[in-house]
Amino acid sequence: YNLATEDVVFEHICFYGDQNYATFMTVIILICIVLYFVTSSDSASYIVDILAANGHEEPPVIQKIFWAATEGIAAIALIVSADDEDPTAALNAVKAVPIILGLPFTFLLFWMCQSLLILCREETGNLAKYRKNFGTFILNLEKESALAIVVPFWHAGHLAAEVGSMHPYYYVGGFASIWIATIAFLCAGTIHSAYWSFGAAMYIMFGTAVAGLRTAYRTKLGIEGDMVSDWVVGVFGMPMAIGQMCAETTTVPGPE
């Protein structure tokens, strides 16, 4: 039998008995598949219904029916819209959606797990609820955050000088070398795709350096936190992390 076909399971059970056995097992498999999809759709509708009801654990039944019908209509629309020459094209496109959307959500999930850990430490009394925090939220609209999208090394270097012992230009030069290498490798990726990996590695290096800077800056200001959160912020929210630190001080000059 051909493993690339959807009916491979039905071909497979034919090897374990005669036609009557194969027919019986086919019916059982179809019943299990139907039950699986029905219960999965019911659970998904229930979860979406709870979210739409602002977390209420007993949402209205009509609202649940609405979401279940919406999911069913969406599935029917995909099947109907499939091309006769390639009927699986629409379904294959849907299969790619969870992969595309799931990758960035995975990194967000890391951050959510870290937030859950902090919450558990607060509830158990191991971490003070009313502790000192940054005065500016990480998702901010500071002008330094916008500037850090293009030239993050300038403010990062001057912030490093506040917690270090060398002249700011030494730190600016160090951060600038990593950032310029990142841009250079990403541009070279148009020539050969292998350079994209080098560019990504250089960016992670720059974000890790920002994370270390945030850890040192927190220590100087007496702000509680952890290095895992600093790394997540430094890598996935690098410009806003720099803007958040700049908002805590007024001694960082703008780029000349």
Image (cartoon, helix red, strand yellow):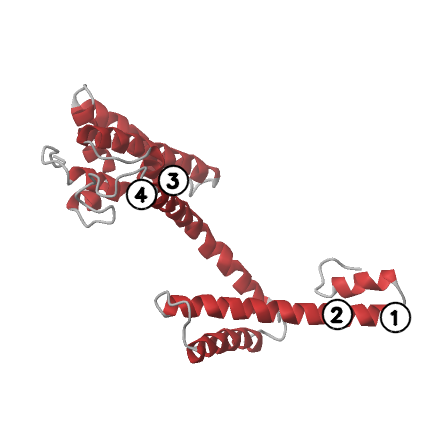
Residue 98 in the image: state x and y as whole percent.
50, 58
Q: Are marks 1 and 4 in contact (CB under 8 Å)?
A: no
Give neighbour class at mark 2: few <14, some 14-19, many 20+ (Cα, 10 Å): few
Question: Could you say which quadrant of the image residue 57 lies in?
Answer: bottom left
- Between the residue at mark 3 and the residue at mark 1, the CA separation in whole angstroms equals 60 Å
What is the tally of numbered marks visible in this picture?
A: 4
Question: Alpha-carbon distance for marks 1 and 4?
Answer: 63 Å
Q: Secondary structure at mark 2?
A: helix
Distance from disc 3 to disc 2, alpha carbons, whole Å, reads: 54 Å
Looking at the picture, does residue 75 appear above or below residue 92?
below
Q: In the current view of this chain or complex, which residue is farthest to the front?
A: 125
User: Which amino acid type is shown beneath numbered disc 2?
Assistant: Ile
Q: Which mark is residue 28?
A: 2
Residue 186 is tagged as 3
User: Residue 122: which numbered mark, if any?
Assistant: 4
Instruction: Identify the residue at image location x=24%, y=33%.
Output: 153
Task: State the residue at coordinates (42%, 52%).
Answer: 105
The earlier-in-sequence mark between 2 and 4 is 2
